[in-house]
């Protein structure tokens, strides 16, 4: 079993949350990073002073590999054209800190809109 931080469509209330069936929800939290709107899905860039909201789960290694494929990562390659899986520090709403995997964006952001709230589920683009 391993821990996974999700921040976009896989979250509860997101269009792809059904893909988390069988995972154990550990809590809501945040990581250091910035979020961008690519299309109908978000992109995460880790680090910095801003926070990205999401959820922490415990998943099996098999479930993690299945989710990697959903994110475009072919088994054994470690990254896709768009994402790579990286270790992040999650601060749970309780204040507890956990290390987990997350998918970080590695493709072009030149046409992306920043999600300044850091919360994909509550995001409304402001193109100004």
Image (cartoon, rainbow, N blue to C red):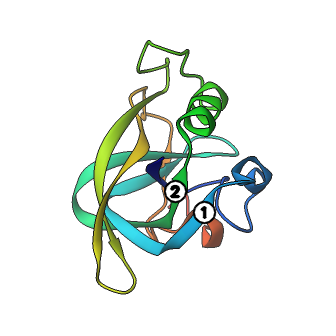
Identify the residue under disc 2.
58
- Residue 81 or 126: which is nearer the viewer? 81
Circle 1/circle 2 CB separation < 8 Å? yes
Question: In the picture provided, is 90 more to the left or to the right than 24?
Answer: left
Write down the quadrant of residue 74 in the picture: top right
- Residue 41 or 72: which is nearer the viewer? 72
Q: In the orientation shown, which residue stands out farthest toward the bottom?
A: 94
For the point 35% across and 45% down, the residue is 45
**If you read the primary sequence from the N terminus, does the residue marked by circle 1 or circle 2 appear first?**
1
Question: Does the image show residue 94?
Answer: yes
For the point 42% across and 45% down, the residue is 102
Q: Element under label 1?
A: strand
Q: Position of residue 75 (x, y in %)?
A: 53, 16
Identify the residue under disc 1.
24
Q: Position of residue 29 (x, y in %)?
A: 42, 73
Question: In the picture provided, is 89 more to the left or to the right than 73?
Answer: left
Q: In the orientation shown, which residue stands out farthest toward the front?
A: 1
């Amino acid at each position: 079993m391993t821990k996974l931080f999700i921040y976009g469509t896989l979250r509860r209330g997101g269009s792809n949350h059904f893909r988390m069936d069988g995972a154990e929800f550990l809590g809501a939290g945040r990581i250091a990073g910035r979020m961008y709107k690519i299309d109908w899905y978000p992109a995460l860039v880790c680090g910095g002073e801003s926070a990205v909201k999401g959820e922490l789960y415990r998943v099996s290694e098999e479930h993690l590999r299945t989710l990697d494929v959903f994110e475009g990562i072919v088994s054994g390659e470690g990254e896709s054209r768009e994402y790579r899986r990286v270790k992040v520090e999650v601060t749970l709403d309780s204040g507890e800190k956990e290390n987990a995997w997350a998918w970080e964006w590695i493709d072009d952001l030149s046409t992306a809109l920043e999600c300044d709230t850091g919360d994909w589920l509550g995001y409304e683009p402001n193109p100004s």
